[in-house]
Amino acid sequence: KTAGRTVMTEQHAACPPYPWEPFNPIRAWNAFWGLVGDRDDTRYVFEFFRAVNGQSMGGILGRFVNSEFGRSQIEDRTRFAEKLLDRETLKSYGRGTFAAAYLHYLDTENLDPLGVHVAAVENA
C-alpha cells in the first residue's frame, strides 16, 4: 500500500473485469442449493457470485456502509475481488471467517485464486 491506496500488482493487472448484473436472490438461492447437491460442479459457484455481485442492492449497501467492516473496505478502496486474489490478505482475517473458508476451499481443491477469478469471468 502507498498513502492509503493499494498498489496494482501484475496479478491484479492480469485480472479481467467482472461483468456486473442486478442482484438476484432467487438465482443465488438456486445456485447455492445446486452446489449443495453437487459440490464438484463449480458452475454453481460462479452462478452464485454472479447473482449476488449486482449493483442494485439498495438497503444492503446502507447496512454495509454503516458497519465497521464496510467502512474499512471503503477507506481501503481495494475491490473485494482483488482481495480474493491475495492469499496473505485472506490469511490476515483469521480463523472462522469467509476468507479462511475460501482459502480452505482453494487448498482442498488445489485451485489458484487468479484461475478461479478468470474462470468466473469466462463463465459469466
Image (cartoon, helix red, strand yellow):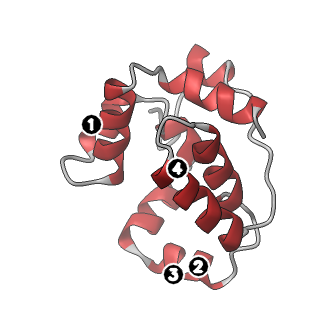
Residue 67 numbered tag: none
Q: In this view, does 111 lie to the left or right of 61?
A: left
Comparing 1 with 15, the one in front is: 15
Q: Is mark 3 on a helix, strand or loop?
A: helix
Q: Earlier in the sequence, mark 4 or mark 3?
A: 4
Q: Earlier in the sequence, mark 4 or mark 1?
A: 4
Q: Which residue is drawn at 60% across and 67% down?
A: 29
Residue 116: quarter of image: top right
Q: Which of marks 2 and 1 is nearer the N terminus?
A: 2
- Give the CA separation, mark 2 to mark 3: 5 Å
Q: Quadrant of the C terminus?
A: top right
Q: What element carries label 2?
A: helix
Q: Mark 2: give few (<14), some (14-19) or many (20+) Cα within 10 Å.
A: few
Question: Label 1 near label 4: C-beta < 8 Å?
Answer: no
Residue lying farthest to the front in this orientation: 37
Q: Which residue is drawn at 58% across and 21% down?
A: 115
Question: Label 3 near label 2: C-beta < 8 Å?
Answer: yes
- Give the CA separation, mark 4 to mark 1: 25 Å
Q: Looking at numbered disc 3 in the image, what kind of residue is underneath it?
A: Arg
- Give the CA separation, mark 4 to mark 3: 28 Å
Residue at which label 4 appears: 35
Q: In this view, does 112 lie to the left or right of 101?
A: right
* Residue 112 rendering spot, x and y as whole percentages: 47, 20
Residue at which label 1 appears: 91
* Residue 19 rendering spot, x and y as whole percentages: 80, 45
Residue at which label 3 appears: 63
* Residue 100 rendering spot, x and y as whole percentages: 28, 43
